[in-house]
Image (cartoon, helix red, strand yellow):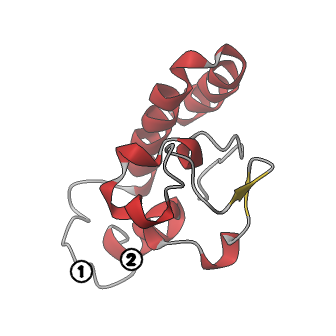
Amino acid sequence: MDFPCIKCGLCCKMLHNVPHLKEFDTGNGVCRYLKNDLCSIYEKRPLVCNVQKMYDLYFCKLHECKLHLCKEMDERAYIQENLKCCLKLAEGNPEIKAKLELIYRQWV
């Protein structure tokens, strides 16, 4: 399963919510690598920005789990939780929120 990102850029516009990404913040909460709502370092983005890789490294039963969280959350639940975060970020943007709600309903 792959995380169904719609590339809205909202997570990159609210870095003040992610202390691990403080160094990427331009000072107004927007990532310095966000260009035209797309990540300009996508292939080399920080691990915390890569939902799928975070699951594969820390939650996936196919790998040795570094955080031993496999038993607590399967991949479908992990994607659902991340989509909930996306929905929260989209609260001020009805168009994006509507797209995300459709996707979320497919995952529950």
- Percent position of residue 60, x then y: 38, 70
- The residue drawn where x is 53% and y is 64% is 50
Nearer to us in this view, 16 or 8: 16
Q: Residues within 10 Å of mark 1 (few under 14, many from 20)?
A: few
Instruction: Identify the residue at horizontal 64%, vertical 32% (top origin).
Output: 103
Above/below status of 98 relative to 36 = above
Question: Closest to the observer: 80 or 90?
Answer: 90
> Image point 51% across, 43% down: which residue?
28
Residue designated by label 2: 57
Marks 2 and 1 close (CB-CB < 8 Å): yes
Rendered image quadrant of residue 68: bottom left
Crowding at mark 2 (Cα within 10 Å: few <14, some 14-19, many 20+): some
Q: Which residue is more in the foreground, 5 or 26?
A: 26
Q: Give above or below for 100 relative to 81.
A: above
Task: Judge left or right: residue 43 versus residue 17.
Answer: right
Q: Amino acid at mark 2?
A: Leu
**x and y, in percent, of residue 66 in the image:** 24, 80
Location of residue 67 in the rendering, given as x and y in whole percent from the top left corner: 20, 73
Indicate whether 107 appears above or below 26.
above
**Which quarter of the image is occupied by the N terminus?**
bottom right
Left or right of 7: which side holds 12?
left
Tag 1 residue = 66
